[in-house]
Image (cartoon, coloured by chain):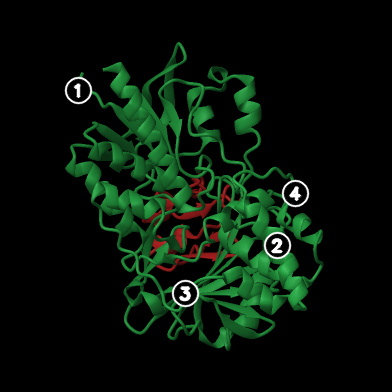
Amino acid sequence: MAEIAVVDEAKCVGCGQCVLVCDFEAVKVWYGLSRVEQQDCVGCGVCIDFCPVAALGWEGE
Amino acid sequence: MTGYQVIVIGSGVGGVCAAARLAHSGYKVLVLERLPFLGGRFSSLEHKGFRVTTGAVSIECGAALEQTFREVGANFDVRRPYPRVRYRIEGKDYEMPERGGLRFLMSIAAKDEKEVETVLKAFREPSLQPHVESEMSVKEWVLQFTDNQRVLGVLQALCGGTFSVNTYEAPVVEFFKLLRRGGFSNFGFAPRGNIALVESLADVVRRNGGEIWMRSEVTQILVKDGVVRGVVARKDNREIEVPASFVISDVGPVKTVQLAGEGNFDAEYLKCSIHRIKPSYTLLLEILSHRPLVDFPGVLMTVGTRRTAFIVTQTVCCPELAPEGKHLTTVVGAPEFSTPSLDLRREFELIIEDARDNIASFDRYADEVMMRSFHGDWPGYRARPGCDAPQRTPIRGLYNVGDGAKASGHFGLGGSAEAARLVTEEIKERAKSLA
């Protein structure tokens, strides 16, 4: 099973860039906070790459 | 060593303006960008065929930013909407005239002709002075003359839309400066996204022998005997030392101090320039739809709302920003205050209520809504008006540009571009005397 991206809520500012770059509609930004829908995440890591505040990472890391 | 004369940290608007200017003047420039895209908060990302901003919405024309493009021979691909601005006051829309905007607005908002004259005099006279001293906020200032809520509402929309702060947070002296330069009404949008503008400046850097390294994070600014010596950057999981005579930081003055080491800065500089920087947060609703939610190309300034300063459907002016037949609308507002204790859930509930009030059938036509907030290390502005740090630092050869070190009397992107111009002029002078 692929690794899954997760949001560190303490670091997330809610700018939504992860939503913009996700090709799988697996990330949403609600009320200024991003959330990864686990069932839709394919583990491509693009959201981790583009997050300007390093709020996204791999689950378990 | 082959070396670079100038290293620019960060490819935000201030960074690319400085890099393009110096490369254009024949300097060997290296730009280091930690992220995989150029432009920082002045960029755009592709989402379902839409080009969506990473921060900046409207782009001022005819000022410092456009001047930079002209001087380095880059394409300033910005389209100006017409009509440009409408004000919505108590449910009625008013089109702003080309000139006399403040008088026009006050003639709608004020209760009688006497109040129009009183308010205009209160702002016009100080804004004609070259220098005015006051610690007051815009709200404190106007309350000396009137407590008319509609007048306050117009000023709130102006402060929120231009500075991303409320009237009680905006220093009145900055508002005078804004009026002195004729407001902020000459603006447009980038039909190919903000990224196209940044790419155009980046091309100037590359064409003139400069380099831009992506995914390269600066971890240290090297300083010895009060003089900058270069940087340490992490690239491909390796730390490399890159020497340079000048370092221009576009990552904000606070971060610049961290990177160079606080011990290299005197207490006076830290107290008077760094610790007084206050950010402003921004709330953005990004709405994708099948029809334009604002029915004209310009900006709808909303008066008397809970949080919203303006609403714009950029795709009316620039259909290129969306797939055919689709539209992108942005609702922009300033939250109640800009500190970490802010209740973002409540803030977004209020701005959504504004959207429902001001966009007919909002819930029916909005296909997707993103509730985006800009704060912390990715804020609306690192420094709200009047509290930017100077571009020069106590370390010789180290400068700040961009947000956090915006040039006085210039606002938004123009403040960053003007800071870059001032720094590049100083570097040219210094380099001449070193040669």
Tell me, yes or no, whether dots 2 and 3 are on the same chain: yes
Callout 3: SS: loop
Q: CA distance from mark 2 to mark 1?
A: 60 Å
Mark 4: secondary structure: loop
Q: Residues within 10 Å of mark 4 (few under 14, many from 20)?
A: some
Q: Colour of chain B?
A: green
Residue count near mark 1 (Cα–Cα under 10 Å), binned few <14, some 14–19, many ≥20: few
Amino acid type, mark 2: Lys
Chain shown in red: A
Give the percent coordinates (x, y) of residue B424: 36, 35
Mark 2 residue element: helix
Of the numbered discs 4 and 1, the one sitting upstream in the chain is 1
> Which residue is under mark 4?
B136
The disc label shown at residue B121, or none: 2
Instruction: Name the residue type under label 3.
Output: Arg
Res B145 seen here: yes
Q: CA distance from mark 2 to mark 4?
A: 17 Å
Q: Is residue B10 visible?
A: no
Q: Which residue is mark 3?
A: B84
Mark 2 in CB contact with mark 4 (< 8 angstroms): no
Residue B128, image x and y in percent?
61, 53
Q: Residue at x 60, y 32 (%)?
A: B274
Q: Is residue B265 above or below residue B426?
A: above
- Asked if disc 2 and disc 3 are in contact, CB closer than 8 Å, the reply is no
Classify mark 3: residues with Cα within 10 Å, few (<14), some (14-19) or many (20+). some
Q: Secondary structure at mark 1?
A: loop
Q: Which residue is mark 1?
A: B2
